[in-house]
Amino acid sequence: MKSGTALIYDEEMTKYKLLWVDPACKIEVPERLTVSYKALEENGLAQRCVNVPVRQATDAEILLAHSEEYLEAVKKTPHMTLEELMTFTQQYGDVYFHPNIYHCAKLAIGATLQLVDSVLTGKVRNGMALVRPPGHHSQRSAANGFCVFNNVAIAAHYAKKHHNVKRVLIVDWDVHHGQGVQYSFEDDPSVLYFSWHRYEHQDFWPKLRESDYDSVGKGKGAGFNINVPWNKVGMENSDYLSVFFHVLLPVAYEFCPDLVLVCAGFDSAIGDPEGHMCATPDIFAHLTHLLMSLAGGRLCAVLEGGYNLTSLAQSVCQTVQTLLGDPAPQPSELIGPCESALESIQCVRAAHKPYWDCLKHAEAPPISEPSTKRCKQTEGEGHGKAEDGEKEEEKEEMVVWQESPSRLVPPSRTAAVLPAEVKPLEGCDLLEPSLAPAADILQTLRNNLLEKSVDEGSLKTLYSVITLFEKMKKNEIRNGLALVPHVPVAISCAVKHAAESLTNRVLVVFVGEEDVTTYSTEEGKMLFVQISRRQSGEQKSQYKVSVCLKKSPPEDQRDVAGFMHAVLGLLLPLAYEYDPGLVLLARSPGCGVGEAAWAQLTSLLQGLAQGHTLVLLQVGEEKALRGTAASLQGDPVPSLGPLGAPPPEDVEAVERQRQRLQTSWKLLQTTAISEK
């Protein structure tokens, strides 16, 4: 099993800088790399990573994405005088050259390719390359936006050519549109490019028409280019997560990539002078976690922008710590997407409705011929460049935000409660079932069992389930797994104990058709979500949600698509907005969910509650035991394969619940028009 996280960095890439006065380029400084690496060292993260040496890219590798004429022109820059460099620079936009930049640009590509090689050959599971100059604006025959060569575009071509990768997902969370990447793959269906970017109705750099939501790709690549334009500044954590839940993740799971490349630009974080967004650095921990369930965990993050040295360093640390497998922090300030973000989400979903089965049900915007290009801002609004091409002087304000608390890593990752006849699970601590002298808990258990006849062995197992909860509460273990005699009874006992003795909210996710007794507590103490094949009665509570999915024919991939549609579009938005302190995940025999889909669910939910997840399986489900344990321990989850269209009945069931709940749960919203 491949393990480890690669970190690629070389101080050599700091050895160039702007040699003349240029207000547009003054923010791209060597300190961007040094503060990022220093923060990784000071937090003990660099030492935990696998060090991979940097190499220079070859001409052949550069030519994968660039023309020979352009390469030959850049090759001459080390020998140019200052005046010649300034003249050479003027033919391109918002970029500068230096005698050492060609050397550094080759190192940036080489570092990126070293990371791709390490991940795809199994030497490491994932990794991050701290590189400079960045790359996503660079085009086939042009430098642009601080970028000389397109590091990630070259990496995608390289992975396909040298590692026989069939499908590549590129996620560009930089605050600027990576038009260079878009141009490289806009007619290529083997590469899915996703970018959110500050746009402001085409008023923000690079001010391109093709940066809007209706640029979906060309020819065979139609549908494989996803642009999410931010038409206002100040986007927050909720806006970023909403786009992931309702646009990126459904399409990505349907696409089923073999490799995920991230254009990791942190100018989309709070405090950045370019982005003017309000997303805090901890959000990148969650975005990274959500992507790690794709492509068997093969994820390569490559640094792009980021010009506030404080938020840049914090965001890099959050990303790398998640790649290392540490529990994600509690998500902060999730208040739902703003109206402008919802407009963009609705427009993107409508534009891609013809191309992706998961979006066939998407609602069209409520106006004819919607286009952000036809909604130009009033003069002087926004923070883009002036119409005459000169950069506006933006009013700099001191932005203060609370640094994310330390991400505590429990001494033990996973503990398990298993019957004596079940072979211990590799890597899991075994918690022996016992009846410790805790009369109050034992009495609670007996009360919950009502008239059911339960032997002492079963009582010990249930008591051990409570013990797992307590160990997570004390941060002695990260998560737990228990094989119990009867799942609904175990859920009831665990929920009753949690409601009475734990201060944090509990999310209960049950996959199965049986009834579960959930005790009434004060509003909001528990959120119960059940996914089953059985129709439930009328639902009124916002804290009890039941989704009925129709069973497709045996082995039908539509069944998996329907399940993941419910998980991505309903369960995850609910769970993140609820922000539980503990997660209880359970399934009953015959629930109809295959091992791969169950592993995906287990993996995705671990981004919540600082990883404190308790999974209950019923005796007789030993087949699912080892896969569940592997997911809890952070092993890559198996791919689901390209998903087809979810059954219409499943879409309708999810949509009914979304419509019912979206007034109370804002992360469920996908349209800008409030529904009454």
Image (cartoon, rainbow, N blue to C red):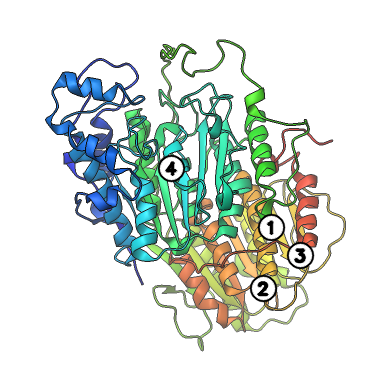
Q: Answer with left or right where residue 13 lies relative to residue 128.
A: left
Q: How packed is label 2: few (under 14 Cα within 10 Å), some, or many (20 or more)? A: many
Above or below for 42 versus 636: above
Mark-to-mark CA distance, 2 and 3? 20 Å
**In the rendered structure, are the residues bearing label 4 and label 3 in contact, judged by CB atoms less than 8 Å apart?**
no
Along the polypeptide, which appears first: circle 1 or circle 2? Answer: 2
Along the polypeptide, which appears first: circle 4 or circle 1? Answer: 4
Disc 3 marks which residue?
Answer: 549
Residue 442 found in image quarter: bottom right
Can the viewer see residue 572?
yes
Return the residue nearer the eye: 106 or 67. 67
Along the polypeptide, which appears first: circle 2 or circle 3? Answer: 2
Point out the frontmost of discs 1 and 2.
1
Task: Give me the residue at 70% from left, 58% from top.
Answer: 529
What amino acid is labelled 4 in the image? Val
What amino acid is labelled 3 in the image? Leu
The percent coordinates of residue 225 (x first, y second) are 54, 45
Point out the frontmost of discs 2 and 3.
3
Q: Answer with left or right where residue 303 lies relative to residue 603.
A: left
Badge 4 marks a residue whose secondary structure is: helix
Badge 2 marks a residue whose secondary structure is: helix
The percent coordinates of residue 596 (x first, y second) are 56, 71
Disc 1 marks which residue?
Answer: 566
Above or below for 309 versus 457: above
Task: Give me the residue at 50% from left, 69% from top.
Answer: 638
Q: Which mark is residue 487?
A: 2
**In the rendered structure, are the residues bearing label 3 and label 1 in contact, judged by CB atoms less than 8 Å apart?**
yes
Q: Which mark is residue 70?
A: none
Badge 1 marks a residue whose secondary structure is: helix
Mark-to-mark CA distance, 2 and 4? 49 Å
Q: Quadrant of the N terminus?
A: bottom left
